[in-house]
Amino acid sequence: MLDFEKELKIEIIKVGKRLYQAGLAVAKSGNLSCRLDRENILITATGTFLGDLKEDDIVKVDLNTNKSEGGKNPSSELPLHTLVYKNFPAKVVLHCHPPLINGYFALNNSLKALTFETKFYLGDVPVVAQETPTVTNPEAVINALKSNSLVVLKNHGTVAIGGKFEEALSLTEALEEAVRSAAIGRLFNKEAFDELEGALKETLTKDAIAYPMFSREHIQGIVDLVNKDEFIASKGRELDLTLKLAVKLDGTDRAFRFNFEKGKIVRLDNDADAPFVISGPKEIWEQVFSGKLDSFVAVTQGKMKLDGQLGQLSKWYVPFTRLFSLFKQVKFK
């Protein structure tokens, strides 16, 4: 029976081959790592071909000392990898140089989602400025990863994190496909695409008063906005948006249940007794309420927890997306 370290090395080799075969890693670009245990990680060595890795191309590194075992040096991106493991419960880090992503984001700072999959699983992908061949300011990447498990490094590639390589790889592949779709859409109808890309974002007027986050006043302010919103009201009637949905702040007893009837919140209760409960830590809720993180994306990327079936909520995706966008109109502190 294979030992755990050898199993992980075999997995890294397989992921490297898949990246190469998909055209997401060429020549000696990109690097991979995974958590071996609490104190150590495995990371690809510097100057290796991800498409043709050998077991001795994967180096064991102590997270506390950054000392490596074996005759090869770890990737030059080791500082970024170690900082990820020190800041997140992630078990894998995937950094590669996808050509379509690099080409698109070299000239653009954002990507308009053309498909539900892009919006649902990727959300707004952060773009971090990059001026050197190696990431010399990993703190900026760490900050961006707090709002999305996938980050674009301008002129350099992508960084994806997750509980397993499949998660990080699927995010990377999804963004490469989203860029491909955007390029094809522009070819088919340049004028319409440019109009979509150039549309002004909705300007939101926030209340002058800032309420403590997750206070009754804060959540009630959101309820008031939702019940005044004509779009939610219309879609709520059309889609029979009738359910109980609760939000909960992890580590506290603060929870609120929204009682929806055909798009209107008819009652707000101070509990989480509902078929659907969205919960998360304070730092994640801060990003959600400030509009930096989409709630659906937070759930699909594992940053927040949903008790209940996400598939059942998806039929109300349009009104809920609008609802979540209203969060940032209510100031909090």
Image: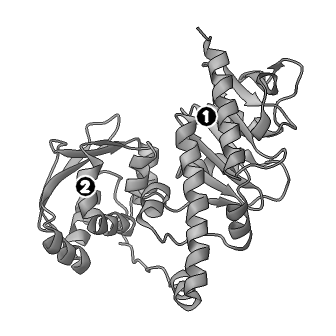
Single out the residue that lies furthest toward the top: 1
Within the image, what quadrant is residue 168 found in? top right
Q: Residue 204 vs residue 59: left or right?
A: left
Residue in view at x 52 percent, y 88 percent: 192
Within the image, what quadrant is residue 177 found in? bottom right
Per the rendering, the mark at residue 313 is 2
- Secondary structure at badge 1 equals strand
Identify the colour scheme used.
Answer: one colour
Residue in view at x 61 percent, y 18 percent: 37
Q: Quadrant where the N terminus lies?
A: top right
Which residue bears the numbered disc 1?
92
Q: Which is more N-terminal, label 2 or label 1? A: 1
User: Can residue 156 be seen in the rendering of this structure?
Assistant: yes
Three-letter code, disc 2: Leu
Q: Quadrant where the C terminus lies?
A: bottom left
Residue 179, image x, y percentages: 60, 67
Q: Residue 27 vs residue 262: left or right?
A: right
